[in-house]
Image (cartoon, helix red, strand yellow):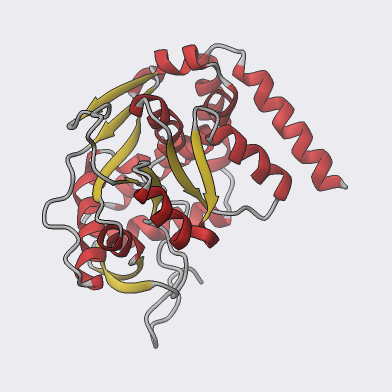
Amino acid sequence: MLRRIGTKVGIAFLRFLAILPYGFVARLGDGLGWLLYQIPSKRRRIVHTNLALCFPQWSEEKRKDIAQKHFRHAIRSYVERSVQWFGSLEKLTKLVEVDSEVDLTDPDMPPTLLLGFHFVGIEAGSVFINVALQRQCAALYQPMSNPELEAIAKQARGRFGADMASRADSARVVLRWLRERKPVMLGADMDYGLRNSTFVPFFGIPTCTLTAVGRFAQVGHAQVLPFIGEVLPNYKGYRLKVFKPWANYPTGDDDADARRMNAFLEEQIPRIPEQYYWVHKRFKTRPPGMPSVYD
């Protein structure tokens, strides 16, 4: 009962924020993130651990600076769910700048996997790419522990014409979508456990990485279009950055294809390191015999 009430209050608050100026909402989230970073917490330790593992060459001062900036971005991204989930199409169109290396409106686009990465702007990018494509597309989502929140998130993420399906139904549904020539959006750069995963390097660390992207691309004869949702400076909104399809992909080698995804991230994260999702336990699943890094 208390969780249900809390969910309703939280969603009502987000709906209220959606009608306020974006700059105010973004600054509110930024300030809240700064405040929460000052309080020692499990999530703050996770951020510091991830940065120390991936960037040992950085000074301690630089890692702390990036950690604080990331915490501000991460909390801000949750507050900005307000405009992303409930803001009008007109408002989102003004906030999202599209920078694409391919013609997203090409009527002859082949079967396509839209591969999103977990930078803090992924929600804005994922919601708006439905608009930029100017066609019906589809997306996979990760089930939430709160079913009421999941239902609201699913509706919000699909409100511009996207079919939605749980990751649990992914194989059968994704292949059907690809046959129907619907661009399919998915994210695969998180630790989902050993199933359908392999250990390949990510910033030199053996990392549990999904193999689903290469397999879907191979079976569905699909191209892979990577995209990133970036947060613009000075509270100006977002950039939906879409890259060219990966060449010579998939290879049919699960390890090589998973490594390709991590290599892409290694190229992009240094541009905006404070915006990658370091609050996630990216190295939670360890190779046999290797100790946890989060104890």
- Nearest the camera: 98 or 130? 130
- Nearest the camera: 203 or 178? 178
Rendering coords of residue 82 (x, y %): 59, 26
Examine the rendered structure and indicate whether residue 220 appears above or below residue 98: below
Residue at 40% from the left image edge and 76% from the top image edge? 286
Q: Residue furthest bottom?
A: 289
Residue at 17% from the left image edge and 32% from the top image edge? 101
Q: Residue furthest front?
A: 180
Left or right: 97 in relation to 33: left
Rendering coords of residue 139 (x, y %): 46, 44
Q: Say which quarter of the image contains residue 208.
A: bottom left
Left or right: 151 in relation to 186: right
Rendering coords of residue 21 (x, y %): 54, 11
Q: Say which quarter of the image contains residue 197.
A: bottom left
Residue at 40% from the left image edge and 67% from the top image edge? 283
Left or right: 247 in relation to 140: left
- Nearest the camera: 58 or 103? 103
Any part of residue 190 in sight? yes
Left or right: 47 in relation to 114: right
Any part of residue 281 in sight? no
Residue at 47% from the left image edge and 71% from the top image edge? 193
Rendering coords of residue 232 (x, y %): 34, 24
Examine the rendered structure and indicate whether residue 290 appears above or below residue 295: below
